[in-house]
Amino acid sequence: MEKKVVIIGGGVAGAVLVKTLQNHADVTLIDSKEYFEIPWATLRAMVEQSFAERIVVNHRDYFKKGNLVTSSAVNITETEVFIEDSSQIPYDFLVIATGHKEPVSKTRTERVDHYKAENEKIKSASSILIVVGGLLVWNLLGK
């Protein structure tokens, strides 16, 4: 019998684990949204509308075998995860890959529309100021 693996969080770590483990265990992904977003590409998506379509990926596009629960985990015991509707999801192994909390759209369509709106704001601006810092500046200074 396959081990039950529950992964809470569908960001980078959660998505990689789901994709890797889905053919080796009974995997359940619990995520509050229906999609995975490539975080390092978000700025480009704001300036290039078509790019948003490529960086916001429905979980089901890569997670073909397993259970997808679009909800939030509200409690965890040694053997189960409780989600918002009080359902219980049992597990043998639990991975908590929630990352940081940032308010985002629940659906892929809403998120892509957000990028389109940001793109329109950028296009309509009379000027744009780009400020860089941190490692980029450090590297440019040859440090």
Image (cartoon, rainbow, N blue to C red):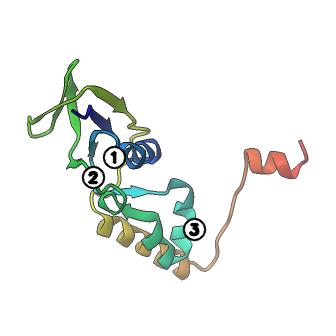
Residue 94 in picture, x, y percent from top left? 31, 28
Residue tagged 2? 65
Along the horizontal axis of the image, is 7 left or right of 131? left
Does the CB distance between marks 2 and 1 fall below 8 Å? yes
88 w.r.t. 103: above or below: above
Res. 126 image quadrant? bottom right
Type of the residue with mark 2: Lys
Which quadrant of the rendered structure holds the C terminus? top right
Say which residue label 3 marks.
44
Residue 18 is situated, as x and y percent measured from the top left of the image, at 37, 45
Give the residue drawn at x 39%, y 63%. 57
Dot 1 alpha-carbon crowd within 10 angstroms: few under 14, some 14 to 19, many 20 or more: some
Q: Mark 1 is on which residue type?
A: Gln
Neighbours of disc 2 within 10 Å: few (<14), some (14-19), many (20+) = some
Residue 22's label in the rendered image is: 1
Q: Could you say where residue 3 lies in the image, as x and y percent from the top left?
A: 26, 31
Count residues near mark 3 (Cα–Cα under 10 Å), then give few for <14, some for 14-19, many for 20+: some
